[in-house]
Amino acid sequence: MNASPALKPGVCVYCGSSLGANPAFAEAADDLGAAIAGMGARLVFGGGGRGLMGRVARATMAAGGEVVGIIPRFLLDREQATLEWSELVVVDDMHQRKQMMFERADAFVALPGGVGTLEELVEQLTWVQLDRHKKPVVIADVAGFWRPLLSLMAHMRMAEFLREDFDARYLVAEKIADVPEILAQAWERAAARP
């Protein structure tokens, strides 16, 4: 874990600014927000109040947790950013948003989402593959949402584009309830490394 002892660990959640078609997605966002607060972590996310983003943030706040939203100025209205978060940081562009989310995070969790969610997740997988960081990346496979991506990753391994010495390392949570333990174990392993 990269957070100093005085700071709560940051869990960056990537997810949709829509709720999606399956009610299980919104339930998962609520459960993840409560879990983040329950583990004494702070949520770091894209700052919007709509869709799964808004659900995970409100659930974190409702459970007594801290929420740090980071949003580019041009998305303030579109994603319905709100001052109800513990901290709302307004930046100039998407690059600043992603960089600041990365800097404030000690782990990444991907809930269901669209192209933006996929792009953010894949960027972290690439950075892990290139050894730019060792922060855990968890794919929350809610209702099988990420199964096509997981199949594609397996296909890439079989085709030898993801090799053992150059792999995109990630963890998979079949249930949101497993996320806190997955993160705790990953942080423990990281702390034990020389």
Image (cartoon, grey):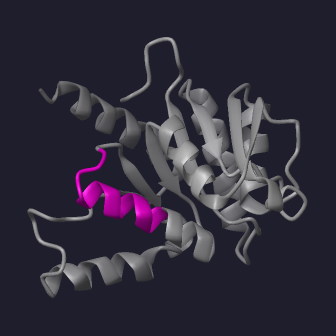
Would you say residue 114 is visible in this rendering?
Answer: yes
Most distant residue in the left direction: 165
Residue 177 location (% of width, % of height): 51, 45
Tell which of 98 and 138 is nearer to you. 98
Tell which of 88 and 12 is nearer to you. 88
The quarter of the rendered structure image containing the N terminus is top left
Q: How many marks?
A: 0
> Which residue is at 80% across, 35% downward?
85
> Which residue is at 58% across, 67% downward?
117
Most distant residue in the top direction: 6
Prevailing SS of the magenta stretch: helix
Please tell me in which quadrant of the rendered image residue 16 appears: bottom right
Q: Horizontally, is 183 left or right of 116 in the view? A: left
Instruction: Let me know if residue 122 is in the magenta part.
Output: yes
The quarter of the rendered structure image containing the C terminus is top left
Instruction: Let me know if residue 170 is in the magenta part.
Output: no
Q: Horizontally, is 121 left or right of 186 in the view? A: right
> Which residue is at 42% across, 64% downward?
123
Residue 170 location (% of width, % of height): 32, 58
Residue 104 location (% of width, % of height): 53, 36
Tell which of 180 and 130 is nearer to you. 130
Tell which of 33 and 77 is nearer to you. 77
> What are the residue bounds of the magenta stretch?
121-133
Would you say residue 50 is visible in this rendering?
Answer: no
Residue 98 location (% of width, % of height): 56, 53
> Which residue is at 43% across, 18% downward?
4
